[in-house]
Amino acid sequence: MKNLLILVAFSLFIISCNKLTDKNIRGNWEIERYYYNNADSTANFPSYFAFNENGESVYFEDYGNSLGILNFNYSLDEKNQTLTFLNFYGDTSGFVPVTFNIEKNNKRMTLTYTSGNFSLVYELKQVILDY
């Protein structure tokens, strides 16, 4: 019976590691690969998403001698495992929110958006966890 309880507890722990929550999204996520309409469009310089508390986020690119920074807001739907970028391009008056489906595996996450013939895919690796 004790072994069964340990197995159940371990299984629940593994499952929870693969589900994105408000707590485990926070931190810096390096963009390992980026696909635009199925074409690899990964930048040749480090790029990151930083998801902070209260739905605030920053996208930044490290050019070596300078940073490109874009602030935006996000909304996480834990039940449906979707992540919505609310104003990713900075213009809330004309921007249509983009909702990504999420696949999470420990410290890796894939965000996928598809609409008709248009698709975006980000493959991310968590590099800093914000507690």
Image: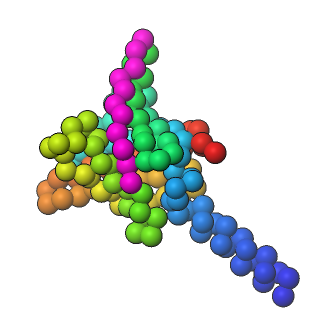
The residue positioned 43% from the left and 16% from the top of the image is 64
Q: Nearer the viewer, residue 80 or 125?
A: 80
Q: Describe residue 110's horizontal placement relative to residue 85 as left or right.
A: right
Residue 99: % across, % down: 30, 56
The residue positioned 85% from the left and 82% from the top of the image is 2
Residue projecting furthest to the top: 65
Looking at the rendering, the stretch of residues picked out in magenta corresponds to 65-75
Q: Nearer the viewer, residue 76 or 4?
A: 76
The residue positioned 38% from the left and 54% from the top of the image is 75
Q: Nearer the viewer, residue 8 or 52?
A: 52
Which quadrant holds residue 3?
bottom right
* Image height of 111 relative to 78, above or below: above
Q: Describe residue 90's horizontal placement relative to residue 109 as left or right.
A: left
How many marks do you count on the picture? 0
- Quadrant assignment for the N terminus: bottom right
Residue 35: % across, % down: 29, 45
- Quadrant assignment for the C terminus: top right
Residue 28: % across, % down: 51, 38
* Image height of 19 relative to 3, above or below: above
Which quadrant holds residue 15?
bottom right
Residue 26 is inside the magenta segment: no
Residue 59 in sight here: yes
Residue 72 is inside the magenta segment: yes
Which quadrant holds residue 80?
bottom left
